[in-house]
Image: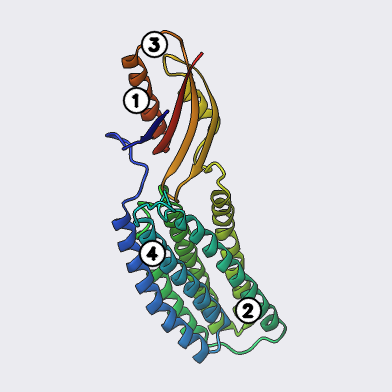
Amino acid sequence: MTHSHNKPHQGHQHTTPVTTLNRALLLGAGLNLAYVLVEFILGIRYNSLALTADAGHNLSDVGSLVLSLIAFRLAQVRQRPGYTYGFRKSTVLVSLANAVLLLLTVGIIAGESVGRLQHPEPVAGGMVAWVAGLGIVVNAVSASFFFRDRNSDLNAKGAFLHLAADALVSLAVVVAGIVMRYTGWYWLDAALGLLVGVVILVATWRLLTDSLRLSLDGVPTTINIDEVTHKISDVAGVVRADHIHIWAISTTETALTAHLVLQPGLTIAAMNTLKTEVRHRLDDLGISHATLETLID
């Protein structure tokens, strides 16, 4: 039985440094919290459902960033007898909680928007446009914190998608605010509230399905099990790979167990070389923890 905890070799990087994400999460949460306070106060002051709904959406993003930060801190806790992988799985559970939180936000926004569509109220369109314009800047800057790591970590991807979507929503609010200012079409405010809900739903659905999949120890969507089997079986000396199991330890680390059926007559040195090659190939595919059992055909 061979247990390997692979280190990425030169030229291949599949995990995001925790310190980098910690910094991005702190900056993103702080900047967005300040904007949420401004947006919510002015949304109430100027009777804009679009602003207050967007403030609620942004507040959920702040909560998501804070929860992700807590999860990444827990992921650094060393393993112990009762938790041999430490608390790394908490990053997956937080992703799932984030998705559920955002879906609840969609329901609240939709309910408020439908009520306002039936009974439109005057809105200060000019002020709405100015506040939303500030939102474009805040969300775009915050999203940039996660741009580099969006493809290497599920939480970073979720944060980037949410913040980028927020920037687009803010742009739509700017346009609606200007239109309301000059036309008096106040129903646009409620319609925009519904649009915010749709944007949240679309941006959240993939995060929900991915995090639910990882919570159930499914194969991460970034891993193709057929490709893994082919890459292992293609190593000289391997007859076939059986009983392959792949699951996520965290949002940044993937584990594998497999039985490697080997050709007879291999020397110990040849077997060690073979195992090293298998580990490198797995690392290329984003699998950093492997438990390999070798059997002779």
- Is the Cβ of the residue at disc 1 closer than 8 Å to that at disc 3? no
User: Which numbered marker is on residue 69?
Assistant: 4
Quadrant in the picture for the N terminus: top left
- Is the Cβ of the residue at disc 3 closer than 8 Å to that at disc 4? no
Task: Give the mark toward the camera: 2 or 4.
Answer: 4
- The answer to whether 248 is drawn above or below residue 194 in the figure is above
Give the labeled residue for mark 3.
266
Q: How crowded is mark 4: few (under 14 residues within 10 Å), some or many (20 or more)?
A: many
Asked whether, in this view, residue 179 is left or right of residue 237, the answer is right
Asked whether, in this view, residue 3 is left or right of residue 200, the answer is left
Residue at x-position 43% and y-position 59%: 160
Residue 191 seen from this side: no
**Tag 1: amino acid:** Thr
State the residue lying farthest toward the left: 10
First in residue order: circle 3 vs circle 4? 4
- Quarter assignment of residue 284: top left
First in residue order: circle 1 vs circle 2? 2
- Is the Cβ of the residue at disc 1 closer than 8 Å to that at disc 2? no
Task: Give the mark toward the camera: 3 or 4.
Answer: 3
First in residue order: circle 1 vs circle 3? 3
Task: Give the mark toward the camera: 2 or 3.
Answer: 3
User: Which numbered marker is on residue 190?
Assistant: 2
- Quarter assignment of residue 38: bottom left
- At mark 3, the secondary structure is loop
**Tag 3: amino acid:** Leu
**Tag 2: amino acid:** Ala
Please state the horizontal and vertical placement of residue 68, each as a whole percent of the image. Answer: 42, 63
Task: Give the mark toward the camera: 1 or 4.
Answer: 1
55 or 284: nearer the eye?
284
Please state the horizontal and vertical placement of residue 202, each as a whole percent of the image. Answer: 59, 59
177 or 269: nearer the eye?
269
